[in-house]
Image: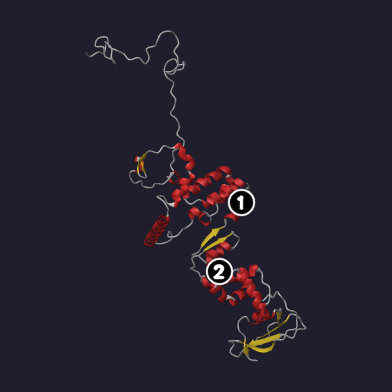
Amino acid sequence: MNMEYGGGGPCGTGAKVGSSWTSAKKGSSGSSGTGAKDQSCPWVLHISKGKDDACWMVKTFENTHKCLQSMRVKACTSSFLSKEFMQTIIHNREIPIKALQMEMQRKYGQKFSHMKAFRAKCLELLGDDLDLNVRSNFTFISDRQKGIIPAIAKIFPSAEHRFCVKHIHDNMKLTWRGQELKIQVWVCAAAATVPEFEEAMKKLKSTSSGAYDWLRKIPLHHWSRAHFIVDARDKPIITCLEYIREYLMKRIGNVNMVIQKAVGPLTPTAAGVLESIKNQAINYDVIWSRGTSYQKKMYSFHLQPINGPKMWPKVDCPLKLIPPTHHKQVGHPKKKRQKSITEITEGNKLKRVGKTVRCVKCNKEGQNKRTCKG
């Protein structure tokens, strides 16, 4: 025989013929044997190391099978399948898992589970195409199982590790349950800015202080969107500014393309907003000026954008304005109600309240004879 024994020899052979095989114990001379699981089947393979120990040599090989074909062979692992279908996955990255299962069944005449085919595809994509190594800058999402956190930190120190919010809530609801708490946890996780996150956490604390303390113990940069390191933040200052400049340039170009496709004086977004608030337009008065312009002095100059109240810095002074201290007036308190001008006065004599004073010397209004200057 004297045939070299390549990688995956018995695995590929057993998979192709659809048979299960067993391995014999290794001999003292470095030899090994493999035979069919069914004792009545003559299929057998014996190999041993060569003189230079650089390769294995096939000494005995009987390729005749008489046992029943098996649709399940343990030799067909996901690692073996990923190597066998490496070129297929590389040339067609979007190949569906179902199509990969059918191709495996056509080639080997066996049935493969959906998960095994999925793992075979993922192993190839992650291991070869993505070139995972110690400096790989990827993001891993896990359910915080024991051992995952230190393993990712050790193997991929440059990678981002984030926690699944669904699993965080599943662990939290073992002690604190309720639909309101579930909604509030997702609001905290989805908050885009730090002030919004702190405001959502305050609402969570008012609902359940225990759930708030438990959630605070989880590192925020693993599950809070407001604390994630987004693009350009982890780069040096020059590279960061260049990234922002390029991003704004692309954004302005995309906006101009949308404006060019717009029909009418308004952009599609502005037209959609205007359409949604048409019912509120009856409460406003618009003064027409000329053309499509309307009288509005407030917008006659350029308005610089500013942060909203949620982004204002927090201060120590109370948020609620307290009214000034009430001081009791000197004298007897007035209890008589002040009547309106339109109310009918009591009695038959007109009161002097509201009358204009006229001077008897100069006959001018607004002064009397004591203050007369004429």
On screen, residue 371 above or below 115: above
Residue 76 in view (yes/no):
no
Q: Disc 2 residue type? A: Glu
Residue 15, image x, y percentages = 67, 78
Residue under numbered circle 1: 172
Foreground pick, 147 / 319: 319
Q: What element carries label 1?
A: helix
Tell which circle, 2 or 1, labels the residue nearer the N-terminal end. 2
Point 60% across, 52% down: residue: 169
Residue 200, image x, y percentages = 52, 46
Q: Disc 1 residue type? A: Met
Foreground pick, 285 / 167: 285
Q: Residue 151 carries which label?
A: none
Point 37% across, 40% down: residue: 288
Residue 240, image x, y percentages = 39, 60
Are the residues tagged 2 and 1 within 8 Å (C-beta)? no
Residue under numbered circle 2: 94
Point 35% across, 44% down: residue: 291
Q: What element carries label 2?
A: loop
